[in-house]
Image: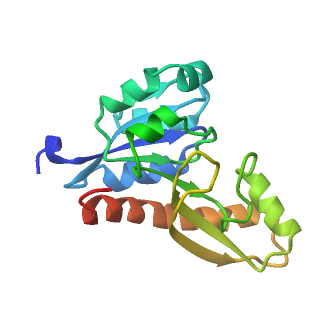
Amino acid sequence: MEPKDKKNIVIFASGSGSNAQRLLEHFEHHPAIRVAALFSNNPKAYALKRAETFHVPAFLFTREEFYNTDKVLEQVQQYNPDLIVLAGFLWLVPNNLLRAFPNRIINIHPALLPKYGGKGMHGINVHSAVLQAQEPESGITIHYINEEYDKGEFILQERCPVQATDTPEDLAARVLQLEHKHLPEVVERLLLTQEQL
């Protein structure tokens, strides 16, 4: 399959980008899907370096550009994405992007939604909250996004146990293993099995 026939993924990431790394690795030599570009709102995001390593175009944008102009939308549209993946992206996606890509933007959240979602619920905050509530299990939720944090339709949930001795970092590591395993699989399945996302 020629590259022009491939399905395009655009990744948004705010931080280290380990999920972005998994997607970059998984689709680097894929016959039907490629990561076309990566966008970040954080100049210090290691995700930008990961994209560079894989020779994937990377773009940095400001809050002003994201929320008050169409600059980011227009840059994303140049890559004709079949799917936009939020991989540790911390800002709420504005309506211009939601309208342009209906049911084509997904997010991965490090907890079993609807619990432990919403503004501020990211990274170690989520795992600390799960432990404080003495939950017997945690996990991941991959979901479509809408106008509210972590409120879109679920695509997949996977669970892992919470151990009595867990620190937030222990739980984070266990949940991250689920993220790394399932995110590439879900992206691949969405792009290869659904004619129209």
Q: In screen coordinates, is 88 left or right of 49?
A: right
Question: Residue 82, relative to residue 76: is it above or below?
Answer: below
In which quadrant will I find the C terminus?
bottom left
Kindly indicate the quadrant of the structure image that contains residue 46: top right
- Seen in the picture, residue 3 relative to 61 is either above or below; the reply is below
In this rendering, would 86 be left or right of 119? Answer: left
Which residue is at a point 34% across and 34% down the rendered structure image? Answer: 55
- Where is residue 35 drawn, in percent x and y? 34, 44
Q: Nearer the viewer, residue 46 or 36?
A: 36
Query: Where in the figure is residue 76, as x and y percent of width and height?
Result: 38, 31
Residue that appears at 45% across and 26% down: 72
Quarter of the view holding residue 73: top left
Taking the view exactly as shown, the residue that stands out farthest to the left is 1
Tally of numbered tags:
0
Percent x, y of residue 17: 54, 44
Where does residue 80 sit, x and y in percent of width and height? Answer: 28, 37
Is residue 155 placed above or below 94 in the rendered structure? Answer: below
